[in-house]
Image (tube, rainbow, N blue to C red):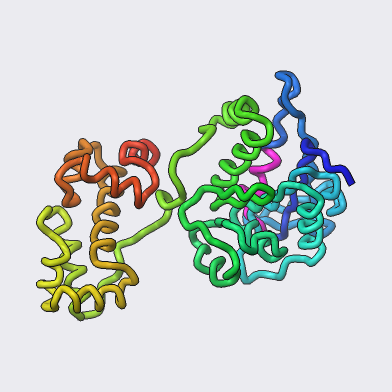
Amino acid sequence: MTRDPATVGIVVGDDAPILEVAVAPRVFGIDHSGRGGPRFDVRVTGEHPGPLATTAGIAISAPHPLEALDQAGVVIVPGWRLPGGPPTDPRVLDAVRRAHDGGATVAGLCLGAFVLAEAGLLEGRRATTHWLVLNEFAARFPGVEVQHDALFVDEGSVVTSAGSAAGLDACLHLLRRDHGPEVANATARALVVAPQRAGGQAQYVEQPVPPLDNADPVTDAMRHALEHLDDPGLDVARLAEVARLSRRSFDRHFREAAGCSPLQWLLHQRVLRAQHVLATTALPIDTVARTCGFTDGVALRPHFRRIVGVPPQTYRAAFAAG
């Protein structure tokens, strides 16, 4: 059966978040024929016939049966229900597999990646999903190469995205990849969003300071570090002294407790502090850097970009309180 690249099939599941459900129909519902681009035939199908519940308490009805996916050149599974809910209907998994085997591009947006993985389409491939469930996703599907810091992952015939708004990034990417930058940019302008966002989802992950309740040498060192992050002389050797351990013993105990090296943890905490200062003050970048123990902005930038995924200025522009 010939599949039409301008026919987009969308599978809506019961109890899905309404924002994620709306992304793909909105993106592909824009008519570009007036400028020589595509006009998509968007076919929204439901996991089952009849009304579908959403997390907003709004019931929706999909106008097409699952069989409508058989003509689609692109099949999209938007945000699905949370893991642990009812299993995915085998008919949905069959339809998704059939679409992929027939040459369609299949995309799982946010928790829709779980459906693609259940269908076996992500085995041996790179993929991502919402950061809140990345560890659960990795444990449930060990054959998938999980990407922890990506807004979306393009594996050719299979695309996955991180949470919520990242589905928009993935859909714009599909437009750019398959129909050119003019179509993607025109869509972005219509939606009043950036055609391409910089960085990955690390910049959006909630990373609270770890609880330090237990009285042990590693905890003492962590507490000391958090109280003296602005001290440029604070290093791993100083922390080992605070813990009253040799450098080698401290490194071993720290890795057992925190799952990373002391230096990695210290740099991460300094960048976390920089994120907070950037979002809540208008201090110059060099001053921000010094409040976190870096000598200046030049020393801060490479660590910030590596951990967060974007430069400090870009992060401030996106997250500054006012």
Inspect this view and state whether residue 190 appears.
no
Prevailing SS of the magenta stretch: helix
Q: Residue at x 60, y 47 (%)?
A: 154
Image quadrant in which you'd find residue 322 = top left
Q: Is residue 240 left or right of residue 131?
A: left
Q: Is residue 49 left or right of residue 303?
A: right
Residues drawn in magenta: 15-26
Q: Residue 232 at what x, y percent from top left?
A: 12, 53
Q: Residue at x 35, y 52 (%)?
A: 307
Up the image or down, 36 lies above or below 287; here it is above
Q: Residue 45 at what x, y percent from top left?
A: 80, 50
Image quadrant in which you'd find residue 225 = bottom left
Depth check, front residue: 306 or 80:
306
Image quadrant in which you'd find residue 312 = top left
Q: Residue 206 at what x, y percent from top left?
A: 40, 57
Q: Residue at x 82, y 63 (%)?
A: 91
Up the image or down, 28 lies above or below 156; here it is above
Residue 235 lies in the magenta stretch? no
Q: Residue 116 at what x, y percent from top left?
A: 68, 59
Residue 20 lies in the magenta stretch? yes
Inspect this view and state whether residue 267 appears.
yes
